[in-house]
Amino acid sequence: MTESLRIYVALRNDIISCELKPGASLSESELCARYKASRTPIREACRRLQEEALLQIVPFRGYFVAPLTFDEFRNLNEMQLVLDPAAAAMAAERATEEQIANIERWANYVYHAGQKKSYETFLEWNRNLHVEIAAASGNELMAEMTSHLQTRLIRYFYLVISMSSYGKELVDEHHAIVRAIKARRPDQARDRATEHVIRTIERTSRVTIPSVGYSRDAASSPAGSTSTPTPSRASGGHRTTH
Amino acid sequence: MTESLRIYVALRNDIISCELKPGASLSESELCARYKASRTPIREACRRLQEEALLQIVPFRGYFVAPLTFDEFRNLNEMQLVLDPAAAAMAAERATEEQIANIERWANYVYHAGQKKSYETFLEWNRNLHVEIAAASGNELMAEMTSHLQTRLIRYFYLVISMSSYGKELVDEHHAIVRAIKARRPDQARDRATEHVIRTIERTSRVTIPSVGYSRDAASSPAGSTSTPTPSRASGGHRTTH
DNA sequence: TACATACGATCTGTATACAGGACTCGTTCT
DNA sequence: AGAACGAGTCCTGTATACAGATCGTATGTA
């Protein structure tokens, strides 16, 4: 599984960091060349990324980096509004001292406005903070779901690159959540988390979004490549078998 | 993808219905014989089931039907307590008339006490009800997560087969949720859903659990097969990359 | 007899060959 | 000229061959 895992990690990273543009079309042979591997592990990695909704696979047609849509962004935020407060409350009750120490560590990053690299590192720390809190809830599923959510969310933030002016208050909100957890006050942690998510939504809804591979409703996805057939969102989607 | 999909569905069904016992060891060649297929699509289906936590894959060692543990059951219930009320509230606000009609349909199953087949059908309807409500929340992710949760939960119920005496009140609780959604009262829907989950937890915690492949803490999983090496829960688990 | 080691069988991970479907582009008919 | 049709090419899905790893067993030694 080592080869397949290597590709999975590499490809995943390229997608999350938007190195591979949302909506871009990929082929197995391209990926084989890019990651110097055979088709089998490539396919395995891609299937896994499809499960995480980072990649869309259309049978007999090809692979597409999952497009970013307002719809998805809204849904992700909404779920964060459901999960994060619950996780914070649970963490306030159950987090070990070690976990609290980790949480504090991730919350203490301050980034330097205007520096792209610093911004990207901040995004990773932000992600880790949220995941660590979820892990401290003592519920593995909560950790998994939050991790999944943050992975999908981070792509949107990578695209923005203009949160500079909000850095301070964002960090303050993080600290407020951490304080509540450390003080073992579940209700307060829940409230601070709710507040934080809501404000983040407000902040991101104000910024202008560069139209790089950003499609308004799963429609249109040029991304440079010649003739990019846009798969319908439905085809590769989730399976809610009734 | 047709062959791979066929196997995925079949294997998934066999695992969910506990036809393949929790903890059981499988090998690719076994699966090839069982589902009359080649290794490639078999592997693909298995990877997908691993993502759903229904199968554990230990590199170079083999496949194992995910064991049932008290830990996982508790975690699943806890997440249901987070998701279901939120989904019900959202559904009360956004469900279309058609969705409400579907929800009502799934809620109206009454099963005949003592009949195993009827019980199993009831479980499916129960699952569909919860998933349909989540879908009516208007949030795809909510639907996906709930579907995932219900899939993992249903295995535990399949193992119990003794909810006979609780059938009536369970159905009543379902109706209460549906009524609140239909009446477009989010808060009430949330409360009824919360109540329902809590009572379900109480009910299931009272029943005696047959020790068929049921391991108390991911330890020991005989399940008949000779020499079943028990993989550690950590190995195939989630990836919370920090 | 108990333990350590080395060999062999078996199985998974990877690479590659084969088969069938989808898109492209040129031709032909209206 | 424009549209419909069809052959060719490319690509994905599937089957199978090859390589490396793990586990069980047998053998030798203390």
Image (tube, coloured by chain):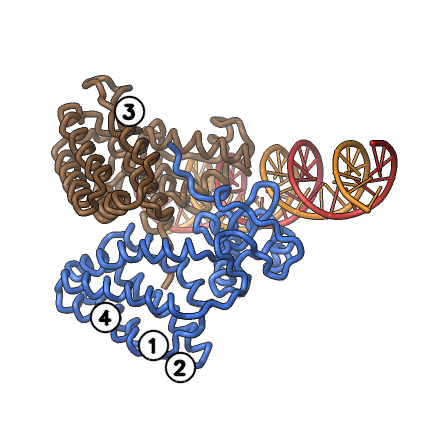
Chain colours: A brown, B blue, C orange, D red
Q: Residue at x 17, y 62 (%)?
A: B92
Residue under pointer 4:
B101
For marks 3 and 1, give the CA distance. Answer: 53 Å
Q: Which residue is mark 3?
A: A120
> Foreground mark, 2 or 4?
2
Mark 2 belongs to chain:
B
* Residue B113 disc label: 2
State how far apart marks 3 and 2 are (Cα): 58 Å
User: Which chain does tag 3 point to?
Assistant: A
| Mark 2 Cα-neighbour bin, 10 Å: few <14, some 14–19, many ≥20 | some
- Under tag 3, what secondary structure? helix
Q: Which residue is mark 1?
A: B167
The crowd level at tag 3 (other Cα within 10 Å; few <14, some 14-19, many 20+) is some
Marks 2 and 1 belong to one chain: yes
- What chain does mark 4 sit on? B
Q: CA distance from mark 3 to mark 4?
A: 47 Å
Tell me, yes or no, whether the two marked residues, 2 and 1, touch with CB atoms within 8 Å: yes
